[in-house]
Amino acid sequence: MGVWIFGWGRLSNKAHAAVATLVALGTNLSAFWILVANSFMQHPVGYVIRNGRAEMDNFATIVSNGYVPGQFAHIVLNGSMTAGVIIMAISAWHLIRKSNVDFYKTSVKWGMVITLIAGTLGAFAGHHQGQYITKEQPMKMAAMEALWETQDPAPFSLVANIDTKAQQNTGAIEIPGGLSFLTQNSFTSGKVEGIKDLQAKSEAQYGPGNYIPDVPGIFWTFRIMVAAGSIMLLVAFIGLVLNAKGKLVENKTFLKIIFWMLPLPYIAQSTGWFVAEAGRQPWLVYGLQLTANGASKSVTAPEIMTTIIGFTVIYILAAIAALYLAVEHIKKGPDGQTIYHVEERGGKIMELIMNNLNVIWFILLCVLFAGFFLLEGFDYGTGILLPVIGKTDVERRQMINALGPIWDGNEVWMITAGGALFASFPHVYATLFSGFYMALFLMLAVLIMRGVAFEFRSKSPNRTWRKVFDYCIFIGSIIPALLWGVTVGNLIQGTPIDETMTYVGTFWDLLSPYTVLCGVAFILVFTYHGGLFTSLKTAGPVSERARAAALVTGVPTAIGVIALIIASYVCTDLYNSTLAIVFCALAVVCFLISWGATRTRNTKWGFLFSSLSIILITATYFAGLFPRIMVSSLNPAWSLTITNASSSEYTLALMTAVAAVFVPIVLAYQIWVYWIFRHRVTEKDLHY
């Protein structure tokens, strides 16, 4: 390796290439022997027990361990996939900046080819390894799928709520026969042993004890690994298609997706190793030595903790140094010359980061509005359904109390999004709030009315008093939902904005068939979402009627969303963005899964996928807009973009630092609030 690194200019090109090849071979041989040792821990072979310890008696058997081929192929191919993604990301970074376009156009193509080939072969190797694990480590496979009972054929759970105490899953969304296919290549037959039976077998073979590993941890990390790998394969495939059409180099949005995909291979590898090692527990060497029995008796717990902390600090420092050097080398082109420099004057941030601050804030706005539509969506939906589901005053109070502790916190997301818009893109803030002045006034008025209704409704037992405020909540929910849809529709379709970034239309110009359709679609989506929330947060007849309302509204919601998708294709350029098409397709899939789960009474999964659908719908609009924020219907060149409408670099940098500190705190607080008030509201919990 030393000759390879320091041999530039001292060796001929052929000699240097030969040394590099030897380093690559040595690396793979090293990986092979490491995995041979690890395979022995997973499936010990080629040993005898002498004097209470395992001793090797057949080297060839150890090397030819059936666990080795699949694991070695899987690891080496995943390493190649990681290399491909790194090549893609570095090349994309330079292509965004139009640096050495011819060179990096070639390298990004080969990075995608390597990623696609290595990832596909790695998936097949993983499939082979999974079948071997089923045979030799059935408990690991059962834990990976949270399969508690032996089944033939066995389903594959996409998601599941795992109850380790009751040893059962609830709300699972399954592919019938999927696990039997993965383990035995058949959807219709193939017995897979469950955790309960395997625990009984282990106790019979090894004695009393708990032989079940961390089922939820293994179940979810396996799915994170698969999801990360699937995303990398999908991006590589789409990139090759775009490259074949000659559209990749100019597609900055997709190039940025490639660059920010860089952490995924490390996430996939880390979660994969967690599955491999945690899935073997409680065994240090499977079937031979328990992890608890392998701990050193001479090393104390404080000493172990000290070394863990020490190694963690050392590796963090090494990672920081490595990351710094990597960034410095990435900034250099193939000729080794630094293209982008750090400006020292005024302590400015690296140009790499500065060039992306407006993109970061655009993404942050997307996150804030996605959070707002997600949370305030079920808030509005519950308010819309209030006079429909709540047949009595007590039932309406149940629904209101389900929102009581959280409705005002949900609206903070709107205030935060508005503040973020003002700080990051002040020209958009000024144009939007002046052009949409009457619409925003109407929204603010009914939201104030709605907030007053929440607080004042229960202050008097008078039926007329309460009925008036019930309709105030209804109106204060349906009007904002409509207006938000109209607003989003105008942002996508375009509004009359002149060259001075001034809105030159009237209130009535905001209303068109397309924007009204957007408003109606928002009402339907929020109503469906609110029905699911109410079903989850209440008990008794209210919960059942809310689920029924969600099922009923699901059909017109699907029709409205499909109509909006078609109208968006006809009336806007939303689908010029490949990413918008992907997000839109995923949103539709999530909605269909949500409705299907609700129909089978898996309301929790129905709400989860309804939430994902709303997030993806928001992402669709933002991806379709990028890099614009407000489209001018008078002249596309007059549109407000993340470039011409943004704050100064200094302001964006300062606000980024502030957001990095306070956004996680706010998120943590709101998560805590939802956790505190996670229980269903009954007739005994009526405060409002």
Image: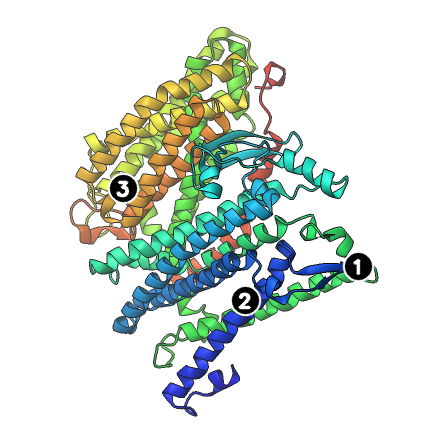
Rendered residue at 79%/62% (across/down): 303
Which of the two discs, 2 and 1, sits closer to the camera?
2
Q: CA distance from mark 2 to mark 3?
A: 56 Å
Q: From the viewer's side, name the closer residue of 371 and 428.
A: 371
Residue at the bottom extreme? 10
Instruction: Reply above or below: 84 against 437.
Output: below
Q: Quadrant of the C terminus?
A: top right
Q: From the viewer's side, name the closer residue of 66 and 164.
A: 66
Q: CA distance from mark 3 to mark 1?
A: 59 Å
> The residue tagged with tag 3: helix, strand or loop?
helix
> The residue tagged with tag 2: helix, strand or loop?
helix
Which of the two discs, 3 and 1, sits closer to the camera?
1
Q: Position of residue 460 (x, y in %)?
A: 55, 12
Look at label 2 and name its amino acid: Phe
Q: Which residue is mark 3?
A: 491
In primary-sequence order, the first of circles 2 and 3 is: 2
Left or right side of 36 for 473: left
Q: Position of residue 150 (x, y in %)?
A: 57, 32
The answer to whether residue 433 of the structure is visible from this angle is no
Q: Which mark is residue 302?
A: 1
Q: From the viewer's side, name the closer residue of 525 and 645.
A: 525
Q: Position of residue 569 (x, y in %)?
A: 20, 39
> The residue tagged with tag 1: helix, strand or loop?
helix
Q: Position of residue 461 (x, y in %)?
A: 55, 9
Look at label 3 and name its amino acid: Leu
Look at label 1 and name its amino acid: Pro
The answer to whether residue 65 of the structure is visible from this angle is yes
Q: Which residue is mark 2?
A: 32
Rendered residue at 46%/8% (across/down): 464
